[in-house]
Amino acid sequence: MSPSIPRTSELRYNVGCSMNAKPQLFGTDGVRGVAGQHPLDRDTVWKLGSALGAFLARRTEGPIRVVIGEDTRESSPWISRALAAGLRSRGAEVVYAGVVTTPAMAFLTRHHGFSAGAMVSASHNPYSDNGIKILSPAGTKLSEADELEIEHLLAGLAAASGTDDEPLQPLPDLLDDYLDFLSSFIPAERLAHYRLVVDCAHGASSWVAPRLLQRLGLKAHILHAEPNGRNINLGCGAVHPEAMAAETRRTGADLGVAFDGDADRAIFATREGRVADGDYVLFAAAPFMEQHGKLRGKAVVGTLMTNLGLEIALARQGIGLRRTAVGDKYVLEEMLRSGINLGGEPSGHIIFADLSLAGDGLLTLLQVLSLMAETGHSFEHLAADYHPFPQLIRNVCVREKKPLESVPEIAAAIEAARREFGDRGRIVVRYSGTEPLARVMVEGESREAVERHAGRIAAAIHTALGAG
């Protein structure tokens, strides 16, 4: 029998690190950078595998078994091989899943009782980037305390004398196990009449989504499912859903969905071609779950980027919203801490904790379709009472990451916006955890005021910290 998903009230986990230090190699979503450059050069990747093997040896009774999967970037195969070589240097057994999605890796790690999982992907980033996401035996991302321990072990390693570049042979049955898992949630006959447009972003879902849809008998027009190693996320997918939305409207499909490169995100489009982000999914799901006694905690977990309009719309339904720092790992930590079983981000990471502890684009699609089938309503009808506030996000390239509000001109621009909006708007200014960017998010009832203040704050950041 496979391990069951722990209930949120039962799972023990580290929510953070008691030390003041923060991981340097690991960001908010694993180790990420330009493929071939530190920290994703061959030597560092090998040492990361070796350090992970040493870390697991301290935590694992019996043999160490690690499953590795990857997305469709041209650099993913050699990074997987270097990581596997480092793990094998510590006596670990490596099982290779081939091209799969990150949530598939989370499932496989937990389902088959692996000591850890490793996904080689940079998610929504361009092909030139890559990353390594390390997963715990429960299929969740590591705590900062665990990441610091791995970094400490890595720092003590000498350079590899030579990285074993032995080819990895995928185990084909692993993907079938994940597809069986997804297919078990809803009878295929209840979905057969729906017509979909599905954008695979030339990423990992290019291999996975068509097989799942075929199993379920769903009629789907597949877009951007011809990866060549360099076209992942290129003008398509969850980061660029416009083509998917236009095709949904043109074909009269019941629903459109766009995944990102590793398919842990899903952005939707209504029949009319309106793009609907993760906040729409949370609003469509939460009241239904509450009405049927399935929403634990009478609340949803979002992030600092969750739209104020969603908070107001949920409150009208008697449902609360708890906010965390940006990142699905922080959403999950709060869900586990508070016993809440629904959470997510506007970016499309949605966690249905009773089904999986991972954000899973394909699972989110099935849950949206299930809501439509249960209620007999379209997605746009389910989300009709959610009216997002105008929101604008500006990204500013920076040369350094000083505390933003410690810079007087930036602090003054932020304070001016806060004074004008009061409690009917929000300003979130933060650094990206994976890129040299400052992100400025401004939302409020007046689009003119939102645009004006976002421009002023972004200009202040560019003047003080801009890269060129």
Image (cartoon, rainbow, N blue to C red):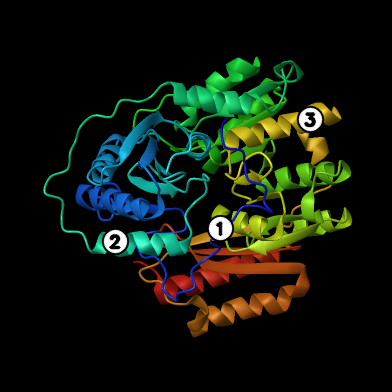
Residue 210: x and y, percent? 54, 21
Q: Which is closer to the viewer, label 2 or label 3?
A: 2
Q: Amino acid at mark 2?
A: Leu
Q: Going from the N terminus, do you reach mark 1 or mark 2 first?
A: 1
Residue named by callout 3:
372
Contact, mark 1 vs mark 2 (Cβ under 8 Å): no
Q: Element under label 1?
A: loop
Q: Quadrant of residue 227?
A: top left
* Side of 416 where 457 appears, left or right: left
* Side of 139 where 417 appears, left or right: right
Residue named by callout 1:
13
Residue in the foreground of this view, choosing between 162 and 250: 162
Q: Residues within 10 Å of mark 2 (few under 14, many from 20)?
A: some
Q: Residues within 10 Å of mark 3 (few under 14, many from 20)?
A: many
Q: Element under label 2?
A: helix
- Residue depicted at 51% across the width and 44% down the height: 139
Does 357 sit above or below residue 219? below
Q: Amino acid at mark 1?
A: Tyr
Residue 153: image tag? 2
* Quarter of the image that includes the C terminus: bottom left
Residue in the foreground of this view, choosing between 304 and 164: 164
Residue 453: x and y, percent? 62, 70
Whether residue 272 is visible here, answered yes or no, is: no
Q: Going from the N terminus, do you reach mark 2 or mark 3 first?
A: 2
- Residue depicted at 47% across the width and 58% down the height: 28
Q: Which is closer to the viewer, label 1 or label 3?
A: 1
- Residue depicted at 77% across the width and 42% down the height: 285
Q: Amino acid at mark 3?
A: Met
